Amino acid sequence: MNKLFVILLFALTVYAPNVWPDENVDHAQISKVAFEYIHAKTQGMPGKINIKIDDIDPRISLFTCFKLEAFSPAGASMLGKSSVGIRCNEKNGWSLFLTVSITMTMNMLVSSKPLQQGQIVRAGDYAIQSGEVSQPGIVTDETQILGKVMKFSIGAGQLLKQEMFRPPYVITQGQSVQLFSEGQGFKLRTEGVAMNNAAAGQPAQVKVTSGQIISGIAKSDGIVEVQR
Protein backbone atom coordinates (compact mmCIF):
# COMPACT_ATOMS: atom_id res chain seq x y z
CA MET A 1 0.00 0.00 0.00
CA ASN A 2 1.23 3.47 -0.87
CA LYS A 3 2.80 5.06 2.22
CA LEU A 4 1.26 8.48 1.49
CA PHE A 5 -2.25 6.92 1.26
CA VAL A 6 -1.80 5.29 4.70
CA ILE A 7 -0.79 8.62 6.25
CA LEU A 8 -3.78 10.42 4.74
CA LEU A 9 -6.19 7.72 5.94
CA PHE A 10 -4.81 7.96 9.47
CA ALA A 11 -5.17 11.75 9.43
CA LEU A 12 -8.82 11.54 8.39
CA THR A 13 -9.55 9.06 11.17
CA VAL A 14 -7.96 11.24 13.85
CA TYR A 15 -8.97 14.75 12.80
CA ALA A 16 -12.33 14.28 11.08
CA PRO A 17 -14.38 11.80 13.17
CA ASN A 18 -17.72 13.47 12.32
CA VAL A 19 -17.66 12.03 8.81
CA TRP A 20 -18.31 8.55 10.17
CA PRO A 21 -21.91 7.30 10.66
CA ASP A 22 -21.39 6.26 14.30
CA GLU A 23 -20.65 9.90 15.13
CA ASN A 24 -23.99 11.20 13.83
CA VAL A 25 -26.52 12.61 16.26
CA ASP A 26 -29.41 10.29 17.12
CA HIS A 27 -32.70 11.37 15.52
CA ALA A 28 -34.52 10.30 18.68
CA GLN A 29 -32.46 12.80 20.68
CA ILE A 30 -33.45 15.62 18.33
CA SER A 31 -37.12 14.69 18.64
CA LYS A 32 -36.76 14.53 22.43
CA VAL A 33 -35.41 18.09 22.56
CA ALA A 34 -38.30 19.27 20.36
CA PHE A 35 -40.87 17.48 22.53
CA GLU A 36 -39.52 18.96 25.77
CA TYR A 37 -39.54 22.43 24.22
CA ILE A 38 -43.18 22.15 23.10
CA HIS A 39 -44.19 20.62 26.43
CA ALA A 40 -42.70 23.59 28.32
CA LYS A 41 -44.31 26.12 25.96
CA THR A 42 -47.78 24.59 26.34
CA GLN A 43 -47.75 24.16 30.13
CA GLY A 44 -50.09 27.10 30.72
CA MET A 45 -52.65 26.03 28.15
CA PRO A 46 -55.96 24.54 29.33
CA GLY A 47 -56.97 20.92 28.75
CA LYS A 48 -54.83 17.92 27.95
CA ILE A 49 -52.06 18.64 25.44
CA ASN A 50 -51.25 16.04 22.77
CA ILE A 51 -47.95 16.40 20.89
CA LYS A 52 -47.04 14.45 17.76
CA ILE A 53 -43.68 14.97 16.06
CA ASP A 54 -43.19 13.62 12.54
CA ASP A 55 -40.27 11.25 12.05
CA ILE A 56 -37.08 12.76 10.68
CA ASP A 57 -36.14 11.55 7.21
CA PRO A 58 -33.73 8.63 7.86
CA ARG A 59 -31.53 9.83 5.00
CA ILE A 60 -30.68 13.00 6.95
CA SER A 61 -27.31 12.67 8.70
CA LEU A 62 -26.13 15.32 11.17
CA PHE A 63 -22.91 15.64 13.12
CA THR A 64 -23.01 14.93 16.85
CA CYS A 65 -23.83 18.03 18.89
CA PHE A 66 -23.72 18.56 22.66
CA LYS A 67 -25.50 21.95 22.55
CA LEU A 68 -28.88 21.29 20.97
CA GLU A 69 -31.42 24.10 21.22
CA ALA A 70 -35.07 24.21 20.14
CA PHE A 71 -36.75 27.38 18.86
CA SER A 72 -39.97 28.53 17.25
CA PRO A 73 -39.75 29.72 13.63
CA ALA A 74 -41.38 33.07 12.85
CA GLY A 75 -45.15 32.73 12.71
CA ALA A 76 -45.19 29.26 14.24
CA SER A 77 -48.14 28.42 16.50
CA MET A 78 -48.29 26.24 19.59
CA LEU A 79 -51.56 24.75 18.40
CA GLY A 80 -52.44 22.81 15.27
CA LYS A 81 -50.03 21.89 12.47
CA SER A 82 -46.78 23.75 13.04
CA SER A 83 -43.02 23.40 13.09
CA VAL A 84 -40.18 23.55 15.60
CA GLY A 85 -36.58 24.30 14.82
CA ILE A 86 -33.59 22.49 16.31
CA ARG A 87 -30.12 23.96 16.00
CA CYS A 88 -26.64 22.99 17.07
CA ASN A 89 -24.95 25.85 18.92
CA GLU A 90 -21.43 24.74 18.22
CA LYS A 91 -18.83 25.72 15.67
CA ASN A 92 -19.96 24.61 12.20
CA GLY A 93 -23.38 23.90 13.70
CA TRP A 94 -26.52 22.98 11.80
CA SER A 95 -30.26 23.59 11.99
CA LEU A 96 -33.28 21.42 11.23
CA PHE A 97 -37.04 21.96 11.18
CA LEU A 98 -39.48 19.33 12.43
CA THR A 99 -43.18 19.13 11.56
CA VAL A 100 -45.35 18.88 14.67
CA SER A 101 -49.06 18.55 15.44
CA ILE A 102 -50.31 20.02 18.73
CA THR A 103 -53.87 19.45 19.90
CA MET A 104 -55.80 19.97 23.14
CA THR A 105 -58.51 17.72 24.53
CA MET A 106 -60.85 19.88 26.58
CA ASN A 107 -64.39 21.13 27.16
CA MET A 108 -65.63 23.42 24.38
CA LEU A 109 -68.84 25.36 23.89
CA VAL A 110 -71.22 24.67 21.00
CA SER A 111 -74.49 26.40 20.09
CA SER A 112 -77.47 24.54 21.56
CA LYS A 113 -79.86 26.16 19.06
CA PRO A 114 -79.71 28.52 16.07
CA LEU A 115 -78.34 31.94 17.06
CA GLN A 116 -79.20 35.03 15.05
CA GLN A 117 -77.04 37.99 14.06
CA GLY A 118 -77.36 40.77 16.66
CA GLN A 119 -78.64 38.37 19.34
CA ILE A 120 -77.26 38.78 22.86
CA VAL A 121 -75.89 35.48 24.18
CA ARG A 122 -77.67 34.16 27.27
CA ALA A 123 -77.33 31.02 29.40
CA GLY A 124 -79.05 28.21 27.53
CA ASP A 125 -77.78 29.34 24.11
CA TYR A 126 -74.83 26.97 24.35
CA ALA A 127 -73.84 23.52 25.58
CA ILE A 128 -70.56 21.95 26.74
CA GLN A 129 -68.88 19.33 24.57
CA SER A 130 -65.56 17.57 25.12
CA GLY A 131 -63.31 17.19 22.12
CA GLU A 132 -59.96 17.79 20.47
CA VAL A 133 -59.00 21.37 19.64
CA SER A 134 -56.40 22.05 16.95
CA GLN A 135 -56.99 25.75 16.30
CA PRO A 136 -56.86 28.92 18.41
CA GLY A 137 -59.88 31.06 19.35
CA ILE A 138 -62.22 28.25 20.47
CA VAL A 139 -64.62 29.30 23.25
CA THR A 140 -63.85 27.21 26.34
CA ASP A 141 -65.57 29.22 29.07
CA GLU A 142 -69.02 30.84 29.17
CA THR A 143 -67.56 34.06 30.59
CA GLN A 144 -65.94 34.62 27.19
CA ILE A 145 -69.33 35.07 25.48
CA LEU A 146 -72.10 35.74 28.04
CA GLY A 147 -73.69 39.11 27.30
CA LYS A 148 -71.86 39.49 24.00
CA VAL A 149 -73.56 39.93 20.63
CA MET A 150 -73.56 37.58 17.63
CA LYS A 151 -71.73 39.07 14.63
CA PHE A 152 -73.59 36.70 12.28
CA SER A 153 -76.12 33.87 12.42
CA ILE A 154 -75.10 30.26 13.06
CA GLY A 155 -76.90 26.92 13.29
CA ALA A 156 -77.36 24.58 16.23
CA GLY A 157 -74.45 22.36 17.24
CA GLN A 158 -71.80 24.67 15.79
CA LEU A 159 -68.47 25.02 17.56
CA LEU A 160 -68.27 28.51 19.05
CA LYS A 161 -65.27 30.71 18.23
CA GLN A 162 -64.42 34.03 19.82
CA GLU A 163 -64.43 35.72 16.40
CA MET A 164 -68.23 35.13 16.21
CA PHE A 165 -68.94 37.62 19.00
CA ARG A 166 -68.51 41.30 19.79
CA PRO A 167 -69.13 43.36 22.94
CA PRO A 168 -72.51 45.15 23.06
CA TYR A 169 -72.47 48.73 21.83
CA VAL A 170 -72.83 51.42 24.51
CA ILE A 171 -73.04 54.05 21.77
CA THR A 172 -74.81 53.70 18.42
CA GLN A 173 -74.42 55.84 15.33
CA GLY A 174 -76.81 58.82 15.32
CA GLN A 175 -77.34 58.69 19.07
CA SER A 176 -77.17 61.89 21.12
CA VAL A 177 -74.23 61.55 23.52
CA GLN A 178 -72.35 63.58 26.08
CA LEU A 179 -68.68 64.47 25.70
CA PHE A 180 -66.63 64.80 28.87
CA SER A 181 -63.11 66.04 29.41
CA GLU A 182 -61.26 66.64 32.66
CA GLY A 183 -57.86 68.05 33.45
CA GLN A 184 -55.99 69.96 36.11
CA GLY A 185 -58.39 72.63 37.33
CA PHE A 186 -61.12 72.13 34.73
CA LYS A 187 -64.05 69.95 33.70
CA LEU A 188 -65.79 70.28 30.34
CA ARG A 189 -69.04 68.68 29.26
CA THR A 190 -70.94 69.13 26.01
CA GLU A 191 -73.32 67.23 23.74
CA GLY A 192 -73.11 65.91 20.22
CA VAL A 193 -74.17 63.16 17.84
CA ALA A 194 -72.30 59.84 17.62
CA MET A 195 -70.81 59.19 14.17
CA ASN A 196 -70.11 55.48 14.75
CA ASN A 197 -71.03 52.48 16.88
CA ALA A 198 -68.71 51.78 19.81
CA ALA A 199 -68.46 49.31 22.66
CA ALA A 200 -67.01 50.30 26.03
CA GLY A 201 -63.33 51.15 25.61
CA GLN A 202 -63.53 51.60 21.83
CA PRO A 203 -62.89 54.88 19.93
CA ALA A 204 -65.95 57.03 19.25
CA GLN A 205 -66.34 60.09 17.05
CA VAL A 206 -68.86 62.77 17.96
CA LYS A 207 -70.09 65.73 15.91
CA VAL A 208 -70.77 68.79 18.07
CA THR A 209 -73.06 71.75 17.27
CA SER A 210 -70.22 73.70 15.64
CA GLY A 211 -69.82 70.90 13.11
CA GLN A 212 -66.46 69.82 14.50
CA ILE A 213 -65.75 66.08 14.83
CA ILE A 214 -64.23 65.20 18.20
CA SER A 215 -62.70 61.80 19.00
CA GLY A 216 -62.87 60.11 22.38
CA ILE A 217 -63.28 56.78 24.14
CA ALA A 218 -66.72 55.29 24.80
CA LYS A 219 -67.37 54.55 28.48
CA SER A 220 -69.71 51.89 29.86
CA ASP A 221 -72.28 54.56 30.85
CA GLY A 222 -72.50 55.85 27.25
CA ILE A 223 -70.42 58.99 27.82
CA VAL A 224 -67.52 59.73 25.47
CA GLU A 225 -64.37 60.75 27.31
CA VAL A 226 -62.03 63.08 25.44
CA GLN A 227 -58.37 62.62 26.32
CA ARG A 228 -56.37 65.79 26.86
Image: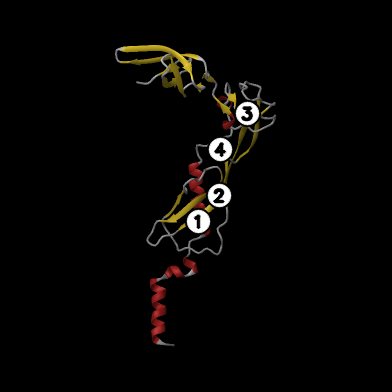
Mark nearest the camera among 4 and 3 is 3
- Residue 100's tag is 2
Q: Residues within 10 Å of mark 3 (few under 14, many from 20)?
A: few
Q: Nearer the viewer, mark 4 or mark 2?
A: 4
Mark 1–mark 3 CB contact (< 8 Å): no
Q: Is residue 190 left or right of residue 149?
A: left
Closest to the observer: 163 or 142? 163
Residue 29: image tag? 1
The local secondary structure at tag 3 comes to loop
Secondary element type, mark 2: strand
Q: Which mark is residue 152?
A: 3
Mark 1 or mark 2: which comes first in sequence?
1
Q: Is residue 214 left or right of residue 184?
A: right
Residue that appears at 58% across and 34% down? 138
Amino acid tagged 3: Phe
From the viewer's side, name the closer residue of 175 and 71: 175
Nearer mark to the viewer, of 1 and 3:
3
Instruction: Tell me if mark 2 has few (under 14), some (14-19) or many (20+) residues whose alpha carbon lies within 10 angstroms of its own.
Output: many
Tag of residue 136: 4
